[in-house]
Image (tube, helix red, strand yellow):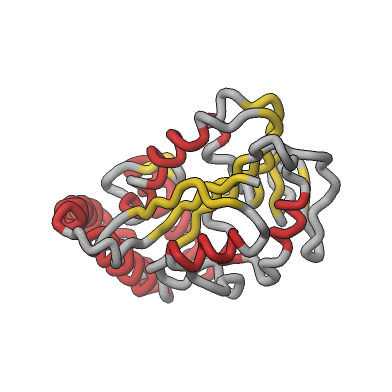
Amino acid sequence: MNNIESRKARWFRLFYEKICGSEPNINILHRQYLAIYQLKPQLKEILQDFRGVCLDFGCGKQPYRTYMPNISRYIGADIAPIEGVDLVIKDNVLPPTGEIDCVLSTQVLEHAQAAAIFAQVFDRVKTGGGGRIAISVPFLYHAHGLPFDFRRFTKEGLSAWIESFGLKIERVQTQGGIGSTITILFLSWLDANTTRGAIGKTIKLFGLPLFIPFTFCCNLIGIALDKLDHTESFYNNAIVVARK
């Protein structure tokens, strides 16, 4: 039974990624599209100004490395020794890096059990040189990456936390509004409830031709509702750029 379920899951993933793309290069047909549709262009603009040695803390598959054309050296750090990771973090200790000029950390802080490890990161940023730091975190978003999901930040909370390290806030931006926030949560809930057991996986696999256009419609509605939301209170993500 497990082999049958794993084959169904593999077929679903391959077919789904063929049509909807795979993270971070996903299109509007993907259930997570609204989680990054504003984040990616904002990060691309911010990272154009990064120069010198950059530490990508929690780099994963390094989705934003190409957004930094002006850096002289890229250092990818993560807890998993996957391809492309230069430094593997163990026991909340960041391996030696030497001085760095800038730091990027996207969707990582919520997963760090000991958030104080970021003190090690910030300590290595050059002082007096205007070292830049960009951190993005979810605010209104479902629990994910369990059991390593520990916190959520408002933009004010993230700014205050960064300032507690003696850093100076340069820029604060949010992503999404009521439309994308509700859509992300709803589609994630729907996905989670069709991933349980053999019956759920079968429904999910054969219902895919209906689920994809349904997702497309939901995403369009979410984008439209975002344009009507001027409250700045229902965002799903935030970015803070700071200097040392």
Of residue 130 and residue 214, the one placed in the foreground of this image is 130
- Name above or below for residue 133 compared with residue 112: above
Residue 209, visible in the rendered structure:
no
Question: Furthest-front residue in view?
Answer: 128
Question: Image check: 204 left or right of 87?
Answer: left
Q: What is the x, y in percent for residue 130? A: 64, 37
User: Camera-side residue: 103 or 75?
Assistant: 103
Give coordinates of residue 140: x percent, y percent.
Answer: 38, 68
- Residue 126, image x and y in percent? 74, 40
Q: Is residue 29 depicted above or below 51 in this figure? A: below
Residue 119 horizontal side relative to residue 178, left or right: right
Q: Nearer the viewer, residue 164 or 32?
A: 164
Position in image of residue 161 (x %, y %): 58, 65
Q: Which residue is at a point 69% across and 52% down the rendered structure image? A: 78
Q: Residue at x 59, y 40 (%)?
A: 62
Q: Is 141 displayed left or right of 66 in the figure?
A: left
Residue found at x 60% / y 41%? 132
